[in-house]
Image (cartoon, grey):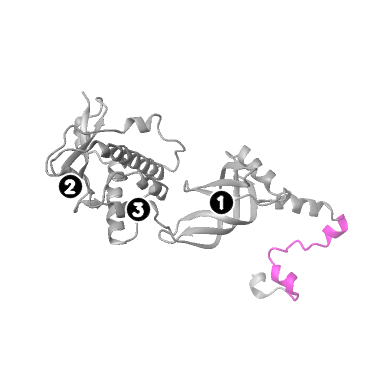
């Protein structure tokens, strides 16, 4: 037998629900809510595990939501989360993972839209368009009260106005110079785009600079041992300050882990250039190079004799 834990309660309010019955026309809203919840939970999971590139196999299927009754007092629907039978019942009582967090952050986002406040930092911006489907069946004067079991405070009241505001939320942006280093995780030569994954696990899209196609694809082919440093103009979210993308690339450099930077022109590393320069000098020229250059750098550079500090 599966274990169950309370996730949230959705209460449909309005003339159609005064008798406590659930109108069949609103069933798509329940499906849309689950999709919104699961996509939010997936993004929260990825944020907390930047070292993981993929979700666990079958993650979406593992999030199983059900309701077993429609309570009176409008149409009150307690939604429970069904856990595998192998899950420890004692752990189920205290469970608070990314799914519970997603339920709470969705309600915090609804509350922010009502008060014209800033969206919570925990809400992945990529899920905002999904609000367009949730609550689509609501008529004027109807709403959905949302109360997650792990969230304190008053219920969040979701209305058609809130729905429109969230689905079309404008995220202010600003631009500033940026330098990003990381691993090339994807490249599209036809679209002139590539993606850099930073050490923090953040994936940043950028435009491929003309003439650097070979450098980018080489870094992608050897992504386990090669890194790139991209300098240019970045686009940031005004609310959270997060880097969204690099809109203009001024310079790309590549280097193997533990080695010096290699410019985008594909030239040799700096130490190779120094060796080449040294080998071009004659024996007589090498003989003229001071043997104590590092100790008396300023004297040789600016002229004069060695001071007392160098003599000691």
* Residue nearer the viewer, 88 or 233: 233
Instruction: Bin the neighbour count of mark 3 within 10 Å (Cα to Cα): few under 14, some 14-19, many 20 and up.
Output: some
* Residue nearer the viewer, 105 or 220: 105
Any part of residue 69 in sight: yes
Circle 3 SS class: helix
Circle 2 SS class: helix
Q: Residue 217, located in which quarter of the rendered image? A: top right
Q: Which residue is mark 3?
A: 164
Q: Which residue is mark 2?
A: 15
Considering only order in the chain, which callout, 2 or 1, is on the residue closer to the N terminus? 2
Considering only order in the chain, which callout, 3 or 1, is on the residue closer to the N terminus? 3
| Residue stretch rendered in magenta on the structure | 282-305
Foreground tag (1 vs 3): 3
Instruction: Bin the neighbour count of mark 1 within 10 Å (Cα to Cα): few under 14, some 14-19, many 20 and up.
Output: some
From the top left corner, tell me how far across and down residue 77 is, in percent: 19, 39
- The quadrant the N terminus occupies is top left
Query: Do the numbered discs 1 and 2 sit on residues whose CB atoms are within 8 Å?
Result: no
Q: Residue 277, located in which quarter of the rendered image? A: bottom right
As drawn, 246 above or below 54: below
- The quadrant the C terminus occupies is bottom right
Q: Which residue is mark 1?
A: 181
Foreground tag (3 vs 2): 2
The CA distance from mark 1 to mark 2 is 57 Å
Measuring 56% from the left and 57% from the top, which residue is drawn there? 179
């Amino acid at each position: 037998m599966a274990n169950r834990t309370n996730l949230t309660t959705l209460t449909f309010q309005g003339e159609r629900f005064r008798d406590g019955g659930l109108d069949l026309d609103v069933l798509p809203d329940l499906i849309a809510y689950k999709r919104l919840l699961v996509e939010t939970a997936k993004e929260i999971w990825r944020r907390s595990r930047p070292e993981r590139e993929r979700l666990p196999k079958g993650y979406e299927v593992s999030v199983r939501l059900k309701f077993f009754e429609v309570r009176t007092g409008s149409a009150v629907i307690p939604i429970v989360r069904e856990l595998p039978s192998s899950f420890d019942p004692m752990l189920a009582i205290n469970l608070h993972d990314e799914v519970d967090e997603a339920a709470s952050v969705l309600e915090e986002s609804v509350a922010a839209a009502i008060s014209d406040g800033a969206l919570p930092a925990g809400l992945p911006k990529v899920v905002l368009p999904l609000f367009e489907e949730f609550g689509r069946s609501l008529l004027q004067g109807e709403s959905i009260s949302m109360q997650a079991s792990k969230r304190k405070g008053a219920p969040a009241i979701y209305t058609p106005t809130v729905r429109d505001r969230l689905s079309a939320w404008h995220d202010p942006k600003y631009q500033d110079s940026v330098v990003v280093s990381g691993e090339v995780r994807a490249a599209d030569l036809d679209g002139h785009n590539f993606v850099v994954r930073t050490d923090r696990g953040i994936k940043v899209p950028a435009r491929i600079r003309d003439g650097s196609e070979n450098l980018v694809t080489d870094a992608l082919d050897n992504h386990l041992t090669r890194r790139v440093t991209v300098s240019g103009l970045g686009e940031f979210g005004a609310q959270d300050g997060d880097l969204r993308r690099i809109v203009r690339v001024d310079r790309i450099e590549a280097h193997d882990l533990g080695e010096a930077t290699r410019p985008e022109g594909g030239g040799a590393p700096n130490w190779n250039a120094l060796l080449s320069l040294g080998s071009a000098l004659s024996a007589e020229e090498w003989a003229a190079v001071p043997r104590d250059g590092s100790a008396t750098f300023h004297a040789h550079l600016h002229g004069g004799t060695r001071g007392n500090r160098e003599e000691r």
